[in-house]
Amino acid sequence: MKEKIELYRMRTFTELLSDTFSFVRQNFKPLFKGLFFIASPAMLLSAIAGFFFWKNYFAIFMNEMVERSGSPIANMFFPMILMYLCMIISITLVMAVTYSYIKFYREDKEREITVSMLWQESKKHFWKIIGTLMLILVALIVIMLLFTFLGGIVSGGNAGLTVLFIFLMMIIFLVLGVFFSVKFAFFPFFIVLSDSSVINSISASYNFTRGIFWKTFGFIFVLGMIVGFASGIFMVPGYLFMVIGLITGITHTGSTSFILLLSNALISVGMACAFMLYSVIFTGNSIFYFSEIEKKDGVMANREIDEIGKCEE
């Protein structure tokens, strides 16, 4: 049996990635068991809402929507809102469960971590995390609408100038979005592991990444690319059936084919299952944090010195 991963250890960039996947592999059964039982209801709802969203979307695309209660766009609106809401809930639960597992693991690596323990700890922090995520989302939407509104005013109704202004503002928005995404990436970590308030957690995350912004960005980007690629595998069958369904839909007129409906279901289920893999990103964030803290404060090194001192006494 492999030795347990020590959280407080200085690591190179390569070791950060390898220890992240080693931790997930060693703790796969208890961690993903907790994720399945706690987060799967929200994921199931997001899959159901996603099915109806994609069904209506492709029906519009294929000009096969039968208008019954309003415009086709209106028929997509509720499933889309429900799908995104369930996605946010799913992400929040995956965050809470993963960081709760890390918290228990830090306290005692040999302790058996049960679903009940993870649920009791996760639900304590759920509302803080999701509330903050929702506020950030609303702020982003408001800023985007504000940019669009300002673009119309500055351009004086000129369509070309409006598009140019919005394009420039979106570039600025993207840069700021990347900056604050990195600076605030660790706020759920501090909420769970330090039982901090939302304000203190955001402040702690912002201060933690000071001086290591590009290292943090690089690690999150590379790990996110790996996890994103792996997540996409879950949706490959759905996309294959989608292509087949679109081809058959174009060459054979009539109602939406069974193949296209099957592709909608497979894409939605694949998307929901992919949320589980986000746990790898949050595990990586934790490994990154403990590595940097060890480098700055020498937590484990100080513990070993204290142990040596006790033995000599």
Image (cartoon, grey):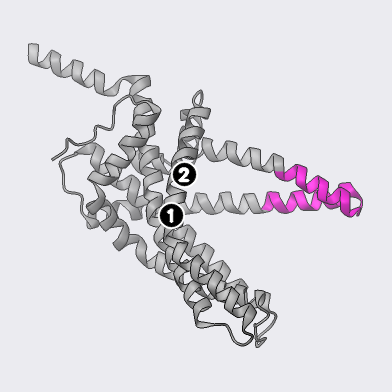
Element type at marker 1? helix
Relative placement, left or right, of 63 versus 286 is right
Q: Is residue 271 visible?
A: no
User: Can residue 149 be found in the magenta stretch?
Assistant: yes
Q: Nearer the viewer, residue 236 or 201?
A: 236
Q: Is residue 44 visible?
A: yes
Q: Residue at x 63, y 50 (%)?
A: 139
Q: Nearer the viewer, residue 47 or 195?
A: 47
Q: How many marks?
A: 2
**Amino acid tagged 2:** Gly
Q: If the image is split into quadrants, where does the C terminus sit?
A: top left
Q: Which residue is farthest front? A: 251
**Amino acid tagged 1:** Ser
Q: Of helix, strand and loop, which mostly describes the magenta segment?
A: helix
Image vertical order of residue 51 relative to residue 146, above or below: below
Find residue 43 and report its horizontal and vertical position in percent. Answer: 41, 65
Earlier-in-chain disc, 1 versus 2: 2
Image vertical order of residue 45 relative to residue 207, above or below: below
Find residue 245 and report its horizontal and vertical position in percent. Answer: 55, 75
Q: If the image is split into quadrants, where does the N terminus sit?
A: top left
Image vertical order of residue 262 relative to residue 23, above or below: below
Find residue 246 and report its horizontal and vertical position in percent. Answer: 59, 74
Which residue carries the number 2 mark?
A: 224
Q: Residue at x 65, y 82 (%)?
A: 65
Q: Residue at x 36, y 21 (%)?
A: 295
Find residue 134 and report its horizontal and vertical position in percent. Answer: 54, 54
Element type at marker 2? helix
User: Can residue 224 be found in the magenta stretch?
Assistant: no
Q: Residues within 10 Å of mark 2 (few under 14, many from 20)?
A: some
Magenta-colored span: 142-170
Which residue carries the number 1 mark?
A: 231
Q: Residue at x 68, y 52 (%)?
A: 142
